[in-house]
Amino acid sequence: MDILSLFVVVPVLVILALVFTKDLRQARLISMVGGLVQLGMAINLLFAYFRERAVNDAVMLFNRDLVWFEQFNIHYNIGVDGISVSLILLTSIIVLAGVFISWKMEELPKEFFISLIVLATGVYGFFISIDLFTMFVFYEIAVIPMYLLIGIWGSGNKEYSAMKLTLMLMGASAVLMVGILGIYFNSNADGGALTFNILEIAQVNIPVEAQNLFFPLTFIGFAILGALFPFHTWSPDGHASAPTAVSMLHAGVLMKLGGYGIFRVAMFLLPAGALEWSWFFIILSATGVIYGAFAALRQTDLKYINAYASVSHLGMVTFALLMLNKTAWNGAILQSLSHGFMTALFFALIGMIYGRTHTRDITKLGGLLKVIPFISVVYVIAGMALLGLPGFSGFVAEMNIFMGAFQQDSMFYRVATIVSISAIVVTAVYVLRVVGIMLMGPVKNEAYNQLESTTWYEKTGILLLLLPIIGIGVAPLWISNLIMESLQPFIQGVL
Amino acid sequence: MNLINLLLIPAIPLAVFLVLGIFSHKIKPAVSGLTGVAGLAISTLLSYYTAWQYFFVNGKTDGVYQTFVEKTVWIKFTDTLHIDMGVLVDPISVMMLVVVSTVSLMVHIYSRGYMKGDDGYTRFFAYLSLFTFSMYGLVLATNLFQIYIFWELVGVSSFLLIGYYYTKTSAIAAAKKAFIVTRFADFGFLIGIFIIGFYTNTFDFQLLNDPEGPAILTWASTSFMGLSLITWALILIFMGGAGKSAMFPLHIWLPDAMEGPTPVSALIHAATMVVAGVYLVARLFPMFYMVEEGFALQIVTYVGAFSALFAAIIAITQTDIKRILAFSTMSQLGYMMMALGVSGFDGHKGVGYMASMFHLFTHAMFKALLFLGAGSVIHAVHSNLLQEMGGLRKYMPVTNISFLIAALAIAGVPPLAGFWSKDEILMAAYSNSQFIYGVGIFVAGLTAFYMFRLYFGIFWGKDRQYKHRPHESPASMTIPLIVLAVLTLTAGFIPFSELVSADKIGFEAHINLPLAAIAVGVGALGILLAWLFYKKENDLASRFANAFGSFYKWSSNKFYFDEIYLFVARKVFFKNVAAPIAKFDKKIVDGTMEGIGNQTAVISRKIKDLQSGRVQDYAFGFIGGVVILALIFIYAFTN
């Protein structure tokens, strides 16, 4: 078995094992072991990648190619570069943390963990695919369990939210499908055979008219998943109803498929389309960055605040991708990683606060620093990371994005960049607003004095997410180099 | 330079912070206090050692102080543009090491007494260590981005320490205000850095300050709205500096920052962090001076001079003793900025630069002393308000004498520290512009007046009916006072101009007797007035206040700047930007998506109705369809 296919096979084995479990204890144990194995595999992959990269300069390493559906030239074709390796690492950490956070999932535990791991399988498959069709299939595998996870284990207006989220993401898939088929049917423009292979298509000169037509479809198809303004509205409702681990996985990993897909498919395969349309999507992205920040400023539900913060931070990802240079792209990938850890951490903390106080309304909370110090202190740290404090991953990502954006020196780019940078001020305001109202101040409710203190599995989950944020923030060079090297073939493709 | 020594200086406070922070619940307060003090004592000794080595042993080559740099790449933007982390040793960074170490050590020792019995004792020392680490990093930074990184870290330490009493609403508001206002300033700073990075392809101080370097040599090649983009960048960078150093109009956070524990005010909001802005301008001084004939430096001058005047006027009418000191700090920071602004570059022309750094040094000592003295007073009478104090000289002799020394120093009475530095600032201003000199001398008079208003108000005047008989503070608090008082008495005799100068060569400074006499005369006049007004209880002051009427009211309300900012933040941004956006999102954006969904449902319901299950409907549809098809065929084929 090759090192990459394991990322699909192991989760499937875990799912099979889960089928035979009888209660929560067994289910979570199996899931935890599965999660640990995947984390081990991801770390192993990282080192294997470094070793292989030293001797092999192919674009994608550990390549494996099996014909799947010959008639349409569909392959099970997998391979990774530094970007996918880093995102796989992100996924494995968040999945494991998600298992720890769901330690007390009393309701249908077996089914819950199975759905969660199906989702993870889809994500892993997506990150290792080189074949567009296979990639799309994995994408669907990742999206569909969301409906069940929110609809069954969710809270509040869960049917509505689950339906809204699924319908919007399905709509996105439909648009994306048109885009992908458009690319496929133009992949013989240079006289070769029709193909779904990304690396092969990248060599083909797809006619400019086709690129201009299919770029926006592909871009929007992926961007809806990445919560691009104005297609983000599924996200606040969806997150508000989703159970904690689902929000973590969804915002932490699934939404990253959007940015990754834009980078890997839309920008890489349709560079002329990207040049043609970039102005339009830059406007949307920059608007999203500042708009999300202002919208977050006004919310009182913790999950809504975090969802809008995600709109703002993921807006920066698409913004950076459209800047078409290595520095900004590096920033976009770093921002994906950083946002993945941060937002998962936030959702985990929000879940813990909600589990104890039974409210997510910040106006009803107050003085939590006094009663649940561990969670509150981590919340402050996470908040500082979110507002881009140096020493945390967000700072590194944002500085790359902004410096990259500054390389474009026309007035239009400058204005869009400065608008985006100004979000750092608004971000500080909404983060400190929550910290001030919810964590500081006098304890608002007598009952809060008896809140349960943090358990070992909660602490484990938190630390799993917090350490990478600090790690990347303090010593960013190695991961930045890992990503930078892999950007080279892409930047050549686009320019 | 010994690299290990240098790196240990910031590394020790960082280690202390991590240990105290992570194990805060397991460490006994006594241990955490001692750990903090011991750690910092080592850093301080290393700083002194470094300073001695640099200034007197091996810093000079051919009479010029050299710059030593050790750095490593931290992150790469492109192959040529990267952020480095490292240490830079030159006269001002070494001088700052001494300032930060001295004041921080004194504050650490003082806090062991002042914070005794507080719930968050360990947390307090952890924050102090975090701050000291960040400040060392800022001082030693080798490039713009590194200074920005530590700049943000001192900002967050300041936030944590202002909000130290986190259950107090006013403290939370003050902490948020400080962070957000400086963050706004840093937004400018950051854009300035990006502009520099893009147009000069470096962040490195040495390259930027190099007269043959990419910034100074090529500033004329870019322009935007009539100014070079490099000048714009410098103005934006100064915006960051103005935010940290509480220059008008970004000063509003500093008075509120007094919500923090008093030792914090002494360390962060008087002696070290707030001078970071001055330090930043000094750090980039060659660039400020040489790019576009020093246009950006002009702005520094006027902002500094105006802030000095503005703050001094407000200080006269305040009643909270810490706020008086806060406005005094702002005023003195304005003085330092102004001194940089009027400075030339080589030899004796660079006296403004030297005086600014000298004043930074002496001010750190006497202002820290004033704050610690004020803390001692507050500790004794449990109030911040001037009207609840009086006659304390009998009860607190050490505090009284040390406070008096500091007040005399800031008033510019020879031969105390403040006299020398202030005199040189005025001399530099005089040789540059009569107007700036006039402002400077007026502010000097005001300073002496409000400082002695404060002094007489606290220690003289009528003895209040205190609930508890005030008593002198414990030794842990008075020893730092005594040490700082000694420094205040002697610091003026340091031959500063030979150690720190813009061109790093050193020169001999002389006292300009007529100017010095005027400055001392004005100071004495201020003290005399304060003596008349406040030494004994009388109604002279209130009669005066009435005479000034509305101006007095404006000043005591800080010219309503808090209200203006609050209006912009609450009414404009929160009510009229954030709220409509949130509403727009709910109603329009989400509404559209919802609408699409609902319309689809409506259409599908209509289509669904076709499947009614009634045979006659199907028969109708069938026959109707046949008829329509028949008509189409007939129409199509008969033509």
Image (cartoon, coloured by chain):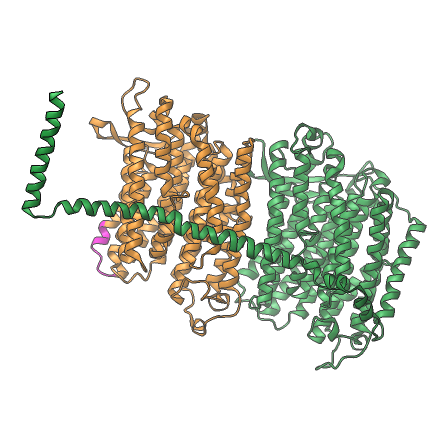
For residue B476, say whether it is visible.
Answer: yes
| Residue A285 image position (x, y, % from top left) | 45, 40
Magenta-colored stretch includes residue A193: no
Outermost residue on the right side: it is B514
Q: Position of residue A334 (x, y in %)?
A: 47, 41
Q: Quadrant of residue A191?
A: top left
Residue B156: tell me if it is visible: no
Residue A279 located left or right of residue B306: left
Q: Which residue sits at x=63%, y=40%?
A: B192
Residue A137 image point, x, y percent: 27, 38
Question: At x 63% / y 44%, what residue is drawn?
Answer: B189
Left or right position of A471 against B118:
left
Residue drawn at point x = 11 percent, y = 21 percent? B638
Taking A209 as reference, is B311 above or below it? below
**Picture quarter with the C terminus of chain B:** top left
Report the magenta residues as a range: A16-23
Q: Is residue A208 left or right of residue B453?
A: left
- Residue furthest to the top in view is A191
Residue ID at (57%, 61%): B20
Chain A color in figure:
orange
Front residue of B232/B34: it is B232
Q: Image height check: is B547 above or below A326?
A: below
Q: Colour of chain B?
A: green
